[in-house]
Amino acid sequence: MLTNITLIHEHMTIDLSGPKNDNDCFLDILNDGVVEIMDLYKYGVRRIVECSNRGIGRNVRHIVELEKKTGIRFEVATGFYKSPFFPPEVEDCTVDELAEIMVREITEGIDGIRKAGLIGEIGTSLNVITPHEEKVFLAACIAHKATGVPIITHTTLGTMGDEQVAIFLNHHIDLKKVLISHVDLKKDFDYIVRLLQSGVNVGFDTIGKTSYLPDEVRLQWIVRLVEMGYIEQIFMSMDITRKSHLHINGGIGYRYLFETFIPSLEKNGLTQVQIEQMLSINPVRFLGGNT
C-alpha cells in the first residue's frame, strides 16, 4: 500500500463563482464533502496542498478544522490567482508591495492562524500573460528569493508554460523550486518534454477531468516520461474545484485517483516504487518535511 502521499494541487475552499457566474464553482469541503477528505486517509494521504490564495475564497480557519477532523496535514498558499479573479490590491499595489504581502503571509502567518508554506497557484490566461499576471509573477519571484518557499503556477489549458519558465529564468529562480500545473491540458507531449528539459517540475494534476483529455492519454504520457527519466519532476493530483466533482454529488470524487487511475498506471507497467516517487518522495523534496 502507498504511504505518506501528498496531493500536490487541490482546493478545500475556493470561490470562482462570481466571474464564472456559476455557484457550482463555490466549493467549501468542510461543508460540502468532509467525509470524502476523511476517506483519503485510508488511501495513505497524509498531506494536501491547498492552492487557493488571496481573492478566491481561501479560508484558513476551515483548513484548521479539516486537519482536526481528518488527521491530514494541509499546506496553505499565498499569492494571487489570475485575471479576472484578482482582488483589487493586484491593481492598486506595486510589485514590491505585492511581494511584501506574500512574504508577510509566509513569515508571520495568515490571519494569525497559519503561515503559508508556498506561493501558488499563480496563473496566466489562455495563450497570454496579462500585465497584472506578469506583475504577480514578478512579485512571486521577489517573495521566493526572500523566503525560499516553492512556487506552484497555473496554466490555462496548459498554455504559456514556456513563457512562465522564461520569467523565472530571467529572475534567476531555481526551477527545481517551481511546479507548473495542468501541463497535460495543452494536449502536446513534446511541449511537456520541453518543460521538463528546462528542469522545472510539472503537474499531471487534473486527473479524471476527461472532458479536457482522456485519462488513457495521461496514462500513456506519464509512463513514457518515466521511461525517459523524468520521474523526479512529475507530480499527480486531481484539482477538484466544483461541488459537482465530489462523489457525494455524482462526480468521480477523490477516490478515483486511488481506485481507478493508480491501478491503471500499474497495469501499464509502473511499479509501486515509481508511483510512490511521484506521490510521496517528490513532494517531500519540493515542499520539505517528512510527509
Image (cartoon, rainbow, N blue to C red):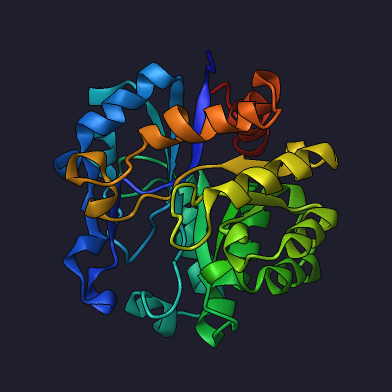
Is 194 left, or right, of 86 in this rendering? right
Quadrant in which the C terminus appears: top right
Quarter of the figure with residue 284: top right
Residue depicted at x 38% and y 80%: 84
Q: In screen coordinates, is 35 left or right of 289?
A: left
Left or right placement of residue 251 versus residue 260 in this view: left
- Whether residue 149 is visible here, answered yes or no, is no
Which residue is the extreme one toward the top?
A: 1
Q: Is residue 62 above or below residue 162?
A: above
**x, y percent for residue 267:** 62, 27
The residue depicted at 79 percent of the width and 57 percent of the height is 193
Residue drawn where x is 52% and y is 64% of the image: 122
For the question of whether residue 83 can be seen, the reply is yes
Pinpoint residue 63: horizontal percent, then vertical percent. Answer: 29, 39
Q: Nearer the viewer, residue 112 or 218?
A: 218
Tell which of 270 and 65 is nearer to you.
270
Residue 166's quadrant in the figure?
bottom right
In the displayed structure, would residue 91 be above or below residue 59?
Answer: below
Q: Position of residue 103 (x, y in %)?
A: 52, 55
| Residue name at image x 69 percent, y 19 percent | 273
Q: Position of residue 160 (x, y in %)?
A: 65, 74
Count of numbered circles on the image: 0
Seen from the viewer's position, the closer of residues 145 and 41 is: 41
